[in-house]
Image (cartoon, grey):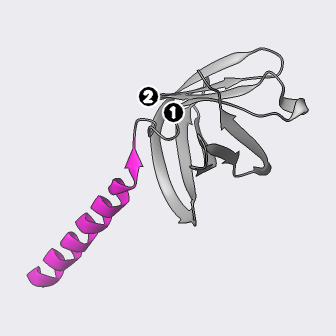
Amino acid sequence: MKKHILSVTITILCALCLWQCNTQKTVPEELAGIWKTKILDYEGSFLGLQNDTITFGTVEGDVQVFSIIKIKKDEENGDWKLYTIHYVDNNFQQCELPIYFHPIDDGILRFKNKEEITWVRKKT
């Protein structure tokens, strides 16, 4: 019985370690920066990813900055990587933003729920 409990405990600890290996709290270097799209409906809007913050700039000119709780690298499909950014909004609600990243040129982002829109990193 003790061997079974020890075996189960070790299995759970290994699973937690593997799960934790896919998460981090700071923005990976390949995602860091200001991202914009050329789609006219989104002119003036942007997505900012820096260290431990995510920033949304809207078409209307509003800018909202939120704290990142964690970033999880979920899966890869060829050169595309899926990251899920977990953050806290102004109402202290936990939110998720799943994005795809491709390393071509200086990088391309696509929101999982709007894959048809391409976001590129703003050159500084």
Residue hosting label 1: 32
Residue at figure coordinates x 54%, y 42% from the top left: 85
Q: Which tag, 1 or 2, sits closer to the chain's start? A: 1
- Quarter of the figure with residue 76: bottom right
Query: Quarter holding the C terminus?
Result: top right
* Neighbours of disc 1 within 10 Å: few (<14), some (14-19), many (20+): some
- The label shown at residue 11 is none
Q: Say which element carries label 1.
A: loop
Extreme residue toward the front, this view: 105
Query: Quarter holding the N terminus?
Result: bottom left
Q: Position of residue 42 (x, y in %)?
A: 83, 30
- The label shown at residue 51 is 2
Label count reads: 2
Residue at figure coordinates x 61%, y 44% from the top left: 105
Looking at the rendered structure, the kind of residue marked 2 is: Asn
Q: Position of residue 19 (x, y in %)?
A: 37, 60
- Magenta stretch encompasses residue 19: yes
- Magenta stretch encompasses residue 97: no
The span from disc 1 to disc 2 (Cα, nearest Å) is 7 Å
- Residue 17 vertical placement versus 72 (above, below): below
Extreme residue toward the top, this view: 61
Q: Point out the stretch of residues depicted in magenta.
A: 1-24
Residue at figure coordinates x 24%, y 64% from the top left: 13
Residue at figure coordinates x 55%, y 56% from the top left: 81
- Asked whether disc 1 touches disc 2, contact meaning CB atoms under 8 Å apart, the reply is yes
Instruction: Decide which of 31, 93 is in the foreground and name it.
Output: 31
Q: Position of residue 3 (x, y in %)?
A: 11, 83
